[in-house]
Image (tube, rainbow, N blue to C red):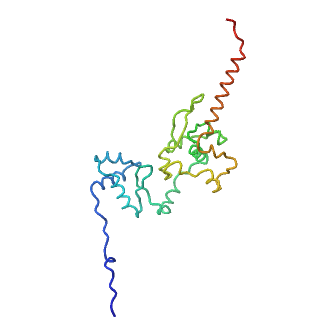
Amino acid sequence: MKKKIKNKKDNILKFPRNISKLEKQVEAILFAASEPLDIETIEKRIQTSSDVKKILLNLQSDYENRGINLICLRNKWSFRTSESMSKLMALQKSTQKKLSKATIETLSIIVYHQPVTRSEIEEIRGVAFGTNTLEILLQLDWVRPAGRKDVPGKPIQYITTENFLHHFNIQKLSDLPTVEELSSAGLIDSSSIDSTIFGTGKFYKDQSETKNEDIYGDIEDAINKAPKSDE
């Protein structure tokens, strides 16, 4: 009886490819970095204008099926735990301090109504700020001041940061769920929300313009009603 001959391809062992010195340098820089890095920053650190993009893609391929992956978000590169390992990391996540409901609500309002002021956030929530609610988000570097609103008092406006996008693994704000998606998931009651203003900040812009027009109208009325002096 003839023995079956194994395909020679089955006996071929695949060894890890040899990586270059530059690839090792890029790998080490990304591993040690405390935040995602763009290509320009990596080029400055390795002091060469070599094809860093190609090196990053090669490393990304090498780490594709490992416990950590090399990912790119908003043109910045960093090592992250593989999504397939998320259950393994659940224990570590559960030991972290949870954000209060007020802090989560405040973050949500800033995300969908930015730029937004402190008083506008309080008006949407219907309650005044609690202790350190906004400060916690600032310390986490999820929100930051973004200039002052052109209304009386010049209040500071707040927007989300790139660190917020990186933390929640979001490429851009437009990737966030829409009013319709949130409503279909049962997370909000869309009947009480005007979808044309939700997430754009238009509501408060229109409000401030209306208030300014009222102020100027009152001033004009007062001038017209004032007694005219004889010249």
**Residue reaching furthest to the front:** 231
Locate residue 226 relative to residue 71 in the image: left or right.
right
Q: Say above or below: 1 vs 194.
A: below
In the depicted structure, whether residue 188 falls above or below residue 149: below
> Would residue 107 appear left or right of 31 to someone viewing this image?
right
Percent position of residue 101, x then y? 61, 48
Q: Quadrant of the N terminus?
A: bottom left
Q: Residue at x 56, y 49 (%)?
A: 99
**Residue 201 % position (x, y):** 59, 40
Find the residue positioned furthest to the bottom.
1
Left or right: residue 43 versus residue 141 is: left
Q: Which of 164 and 1 is in front in this view?
A: 1
Quadrant of the image containing the C terminus: top right
Q: Residue furthest top?
A: 231
Q: In this view, does 53 lie above or below 62?
A: above
- Give the x, y percent position of residue 62: 36, 61
Q: Which residue is found at the position 34% from the left and 87% from the top?
A: 4
Name the residue at 64% across, 56% down: 184
Image x and y of residue 229, in percent: 69, 8
Q: Residue furthest left?
A: 21
